[in-house]
């Protein structure tokens, strides 16, 4: 079976999903009266719905296409992404979910600015939100472009332009409330797609995880199509791809602590009714994403098994060629096509789109909040009327959504999960230290916050984009863990220096009131 | 203000008391697997290599169990704090 053109069922399913999202969005549009409705869905989202929406926000193209893809490519080493993405929620649960909800502002820059009474900190927060979110958006556009190209045989560039326009439309019109409803639907589509991809080989074909790993471990010889030597024992062992311990530790730390610094995830906790609901939400999220991350590396391994057994299993040469050429990002749709023909391919493609749409929607809302609420309203025009604020949010959403197009072009040749890992690196090294210290350390000062944000942003910028200019010992494939430690040090040292110079005057005058708000009981 | 400090420290101690061992456990699993990879790959439980058990399977139910307990306890601490504050 061919993957392009000849798949009307797939196209119909996908278009059906898109239409359903749009109808929901248009319906919800009628209830966007205030900026709190637009950004935070009126702060009344039930824990389970919020958990499904957060999981959908979080399970992006990196998780849906990337984790299975990286497991397909690198075997056991690819599983570190699933583990890291999952464990990332724990730092959020332990240190931030409840206090941030109790603090009750719209965005991360809001927190930084109001905790330290500092406009520079707010502006740095906005830069951080944009840097992280745009880095995160690039691989989503990559996934969208590749899947759309696969589905409709469109050029990559045409695909990302269409996708950017669709997402921009429905986020701009619907805001957070519609996005939440859409994400709830999208989560169950993408989860269902991954479930079927794991269920069919496991239950119907009898490919147990143990048997698949055993087969791969014992395989040694040339891989089909490429003819490259494949060493199964190395593939199923640690350090097949992650050969440097320093690099791998830094990657693990970035994944473990990056989640707690992702603006589009953090903003979601402001939509919970209270701090307890925020904690309960994280538990639901842990269940949902945990089940997903058990399945996706298994699917990646099964796809490798199919690829190596292709001839004996009667896999079409076209699919084999697709796996050889595009397996790093498109192994999951190919598995859908192999196990369930057009119907499962349709469901998988719809799942991939659901993952991409929901995540990009969350990123656009977070960026629009940073630009519209933090920059335009709070820095330039605090007296702006409520109606104009919603309009500013919508204009910011359009601008950010359309930025997805150049980002998609930039990311075209990369691997989705690896690129998202870099967004986690920036989040782990910028917001995570600043938020954790800001929430728990009363002696943190304004200079400490600014020093932390500057270290995180500048450090990760140079270590990711200027890697080749750095000395060898500072070159990391993922510098998240390394820069995160530097940021903690910068916050501590700058705060201590300011405190030594100014004494108690270095601390914001309402520090203890803020601590009471963050950690004390919530008012009914 | 002393009361707020006591509350903050109690919550922080609880979060660190659970978080530090948990993160040490995750990093410990990772170091075990990477530094003793050949050994871990050689140990098999129900036909599944130990390193896969640890990283791809076992971490999930362990985390679920631990953090369901954590959330229950954290919410109880919060209720106690609310009662104490109301009583004073």
Image (tube, helix red, strand yellow):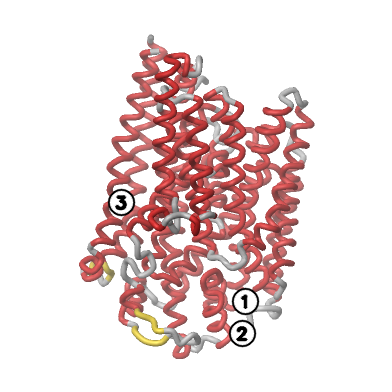
Asked if marks 1 and 2 fall on the same chain, the answer is yes
Marks 1,2: beta carbons within 8 A:
yes
Residue indicated by mark 2: A1
Asked if marks 3 and 2 fall on the same chain, the answer is no
Given this view, does label 3 or label 2 mark the residue nearer the observer?
A: 3
Given this view, does label 1 or label 2 mark the residue nearer the observer?
A: 2
Between the residue at mark 3 and the residue at mark 2, the CA separation in whole angstroms equals 44 Å
* x then y, percent, for residue A328: 51, 71
Q: How many marks?
A: 3
* x then y, percent, for residue A195: 49, 64
Label 1 neighbourhood size at 10 Å, few (<14), some (14-19), many (20+)?
Answer: many
* x then y, percent, for residue A346: 63, 70
Q: Residue furthest top?
A: B88
- Whether residue A166 is visible, yes or no, is yes
Residue indicated by mark 3: B27
Given this view, does label 3 or label 1 mark the residue nearer the observer?
A: 3
- Residue A190 sits above or below residue B88 on the image: below
Quadrant of the rendering where the N terminus of chain A is positioned: bottom right
- Residue displayed at 52% across by 56% down: A420
Query: Callout 1: helix, strand or loop?
Result: helix
Which mark is on residue A342?
1
């Amino acid at each position: 079976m061919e993957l392009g053109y000849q798949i009307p069922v797939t196209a119909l399913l996908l278009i059906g999903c898109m239409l359903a999202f749009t109808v929901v969005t248009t319906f919800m549009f009628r209830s966007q009266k205030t900026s709190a409705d637009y950004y935070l869905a009126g702060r009344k989202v039930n824990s389970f719905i919020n958990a499904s929406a957060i999981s959908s926000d979080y399970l992006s193209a990196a998780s849906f296409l990337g984790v299975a893809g990286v497991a397909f490519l690198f075997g056991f080493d690819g599983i570190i992404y699933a583990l890291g993405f999952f464990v990332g929620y724990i730092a959020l649960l332990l240190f931030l979910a409840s206090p941030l909800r109790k603090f009750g502002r719209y965005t991360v820059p809001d927190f930084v600015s109001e905790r330290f009474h500092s406009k520079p900190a707010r502006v740095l927060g906005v830069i951080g939100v944009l840097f992280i979110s745009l880095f995160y958006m690039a691989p989503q556009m990559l996934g969208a472009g590749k899947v759309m190209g696969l589905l409709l045989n469109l050029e990559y560039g045409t695909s990302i332009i269409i996708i950017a326009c669709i997402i921009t439309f429905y986020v701009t019109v619907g805001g957070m409330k519609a996005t939440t409803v859409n994400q709830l639907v999208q989560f169950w589509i993408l989860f269902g797609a991954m479930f079927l991809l794991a269920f069919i080989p496991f239950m119907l074909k009898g490919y147990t995880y143990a048997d698949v790993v055993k087969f791969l471990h014992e395989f040694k010889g040339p891989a089909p199509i490429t003819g490259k030597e494949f060493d199964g024992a190395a593939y199923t062992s640690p350090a097949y791809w992650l050969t440097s311990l320093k690099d791998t530790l830094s990657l693990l730390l970035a994944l473990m602590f990056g989640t707690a610094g992702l603006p589009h995830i953090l903003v979601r906790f402001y939509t919970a009714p209270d701090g307890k609901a925020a904690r309960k939400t994280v538990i639901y999220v842990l269940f949902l994403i945990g089940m997903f991350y058990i399945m996706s590396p298994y699917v990646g391994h099964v796809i490798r098994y199919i690829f190596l057994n292709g001839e004996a299993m009667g896999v079409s040469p076209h699919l084999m060629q697709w796996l050889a050429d595009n397996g790093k990002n498109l192994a999951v749709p190919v598995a859908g096509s192999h196990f369930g023909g057009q119907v499962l391919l349709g469901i998988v493609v719809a799942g991939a789109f659901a993952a991409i749409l929901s995540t990009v929607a969350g990123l656009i809302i977070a960026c629009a909040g940073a630009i519209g609420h933090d920059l335009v309203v709070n820095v330039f025009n605090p007296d702006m009327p409520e109606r104009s604020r919603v309009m500013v949010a919508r204009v910011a959403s359009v601008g950010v959504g359309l930025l997805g197009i150049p980002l998609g072009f930039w990311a075209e040749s990369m691997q989705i999960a690896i690129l998202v890992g870099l967004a986690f690196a920036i989040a782990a090294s910028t917001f995570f230290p600043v938020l954790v210290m800001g929430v728990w350390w009363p002696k943190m000062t304004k200079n400490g916050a600014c020093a932390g944000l500057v270290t995180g942003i500048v450090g990760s910028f140079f270590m990711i984009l200027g890697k080749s200019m750095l000395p060898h010992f500072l070159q990391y494939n993922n510098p998240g863990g390394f820069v995160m430690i530097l940021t903690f040090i910068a916050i501590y040292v700058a705060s201590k220096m300011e405190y030594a110079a100014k004494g108690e005057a270095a601390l914001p005058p309402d520090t203890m009131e803020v601590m009471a708000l963050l950690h004390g009981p919530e008012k009914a | 203000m002393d009361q707020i400090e006591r509350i903050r420290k109690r919550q922080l101690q609880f979060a660190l008391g659970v978080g530090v061992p948990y993160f040490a456990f995750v990093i410990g699993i990772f170091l075990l697997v990477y530094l003793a990879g050949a050994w871990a790959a050689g140990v098999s439980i129900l036909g599944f290599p130990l390193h896969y058990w640890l990283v791809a399977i076992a971490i999930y139910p362990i985390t679920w169990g631990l953090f369901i307990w954590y959330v229950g306890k954290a919410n109880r601490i919060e209720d106690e704090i609310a009662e104490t504050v109301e009583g004073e």
